[in-house]
Amino acid sequence: QVQLVESGGGLVQPGGSLRLSCAASGSFVRLNVMGWHRQAPGKQRELVATITRGGNTNYADSVKGRFTISRDNAKNTMWLQMNSVKPEDTAVYYCNAVYGLGLNSWGQGTMVTISS
């Protein structure tokens, strides 16, 4: 099983930056695709970005050019660098990892608030 813990959320002004981290622990061979999702108040959870073990990335159109996803396979850690943030980026951000034969694990979420 994999346990995921997010950190780095908080209150940031529009136009600012924030870096989220996701640390994985537990008994597993290796993590495959990892990703960040977010859920804004009153809205459904949506994909933000994903990264494969080999480093291939994919982004939602709404964050392309502003957010950067990265990972360190040796440390089982993933990050989301958020730049030029907007009020509409306000949401709970969740870390996700796929491992083993298609097993899925989610973190508990970290709140990001973009407001002046």
Image: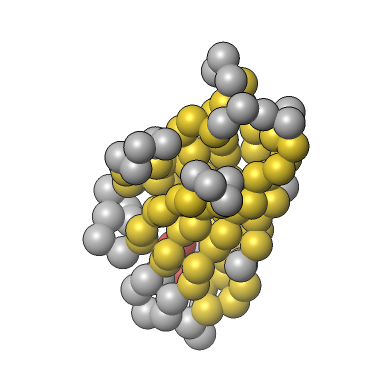
**Measured along the vertical axis of the image, is residue 43 above or below residue 97?**
below
**Measured along the vertical axis of the image, is residue 26 above or below residue 60?**
above
Quadrant of residue 100 in the image? top right
Q: Where is residue 56 in the image (x, y as percent from the top left)?
A: 30, 40
52 vs 73, left or right, is left
How many numbered callouts?
0
Q: At x 35% / y 37%, what residue is drawn?
A: 54
Q: Position of residue 61 (x, y in %)?
A: 28, 48
Q: Which of 54 and 41 is in front in this view?
A: 54
Find the residue positioned furthest to the left.
Answer: 65
Asked if residue 107 shows in the view, the reply is no
Q: Which of 95 and 37 is in front in this view?
A: 95
Q: At x 39% / y 41%, what residue is drawn?
A: 51
**Measured along the vertical axis of the image, is residue 63 above or below residue 85?**
above
Q: At x 57% / y 70%, what residue is drawn?
A: 113
Q: At x 62% / y 72%, what residue is drawn?
A: 10
Q: Which of 41 and 13 is in front in this view?
A: 13
